[in-house]
Amino acid sequence: MNGMQAPRERVFAFLFPAEADNWLAVLRVGLGLQAVLYALSLRNDWSYLLSETGQGLVGRDLTEAILSVESHFVPKLAWLVTLGAHVGLHEETVLDATWTCLFVVGCTLLLGLFCRSSAILAWFLHLCAAKSGGFVSYGVDNFMTIGLFYLMLSPLPDRYSVDWRLRKRRSKDPQLLGFWRRVLQLHLCLIYFFSGLTKCLGSGWWDGSNLWRALIRPPSNIIDPEVLVRWKDLFPVAGFLIFFLEIGYPIFIWKRRTRGAWLICICGMHIVIGLAMGMYLFALIMIVLNVAAFGPGLMQAKRERTAPQMEEIVA
C-alpha cells in the first residue's frame, strides 16, 4: 500500500501545491489592463465590425450563422441584441452598451473591485465579441479567453484587490490557488510545445521564409522592406531560435536554474514580435500569462539559493 500511495502523494503534491496569491494578482491586473486596452483599441470600429448588416465589414449575421452550425451554445452578440430588442433597444445601443460594460469591467478588474463578477462578465462579453467577429479576430482573442476563463474560476480575490481590503473577503485554500496556477502552467507548456513542433516540422521556419512573409504582409508590414532585405540572413537564425524556445519551454521553464532565463527570453520574444508587427495586445497577453504562471517565486527561489552561499561566506 505504501508503494501505491507514494506516487499518488507526489501527483497530489504536484497538482495541489500550496501557493500564495501573488500570481493571481498579476493575472487579475494584467487581464484588467488587457481588457481596457482591447476595448479602447476597438472603440472607433466596434459598431462597424460587429453590426449585423449594413455597417459591418463582413456582417455579424454571417459569422454567427456559421457559429450556430458548430454549436448553439457558444456565446454571441446576437443573444444580447435579441435581449435588448425585447425591451425596445436598437442594435447600435446594445453594441455601445456592450463596449461600455467591457471597458468598465476591465477597470474594475484593475482595481480588484467585484473581482468574481467582473471576471465572469469580462469573459462572457469578450467571448461574445470574439466569436461574433470571428472573421476579424486572431490569436489575442483566444488567449484573452483562456486567461479570463482561468481568472473567473480561480479563488478570487487576491490580497492586493479592493475587495480584500474593504470587504474583508479572503481566499481560503492555498492548495486551490496552487491548483489553478498549475493548470495555467501546464496549459502554456502544451501551447508552446505544439506551436514549436508545428514550426519545426515545416521548412518555412528553417529558411526564414515564414518570418519574411509575416513581416511584409499588411497590416504587419511596419518595418521598411529595405531593412528586411538587409537583414535577411538573420531570418533563418531567428526562426530556429523561436521554435527552439517554444519546444524547450516545457523542459527549461520548470527547472529552477533555467526558469528565469527562459521566462525572460519568451517575454523578450513576444516584445520583439509585438514591436516588429504591431501586435501589441498579443504581446501583452502572452507576457501577462507567462509572468502570472512562472514569474512569482523567482525572487524567492533566488534568495533561497543565495542564502546558503552567504552563510558560508559569513562563516
Image: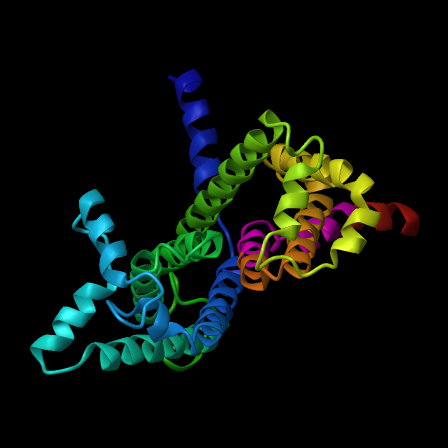
Q: Which residue shows up at 67% across the image and 52% down it? A: 298
Say which of 157 and 90 sits in front.
90
Question: Does 44 sit above or below residue 176?
Answer: below
Q: Which residues are magenta?
A: 286-305
Extreme residue in the left direction: 86
Q: Is residue 87 left or right of residue 161?
A: left
Give the image quarter of residue 247. Answer: top right
- Tell which of 3 and 110 is nearer to you: 110
For this view, does 198 lie left or right of residue 184?
A: right
Q: How is the image coloured?
A: rainbow
Would you place residue 58 above or below residue 290 in this image?
below
Does 224 appear in magenta?
A: no
149 relative to 161, above or below: above
Evaluate whether residue 164 shows in this view: no
Q: Residue at x 91, y 52 (%)?
A: 314
Residue 188, position as x, y percentages in the image: 51, 43
Please name whichever residue, 79 or 111, is drawn nearer the observer in this view of the structure.
79
Residue at image coords 68%, 50%: 269
Total marks in image: 0
Q: Give how far across and how far down residue 145 sits, in percent.
A: 39, 55
The image shows residue 108 at horizontal and vertical percentages of 41, 77
Residue 256 percent across, percent down from the top left: 68, 40
Is residue 293 on the magenta stretch?
yes
| The N terminus sits in image quarter | top left
Quarter of the view holding residue 15 = top left
Main secondary structure found in the magenta portion:
helix
- Residue 81 visible in the snapshot: yes
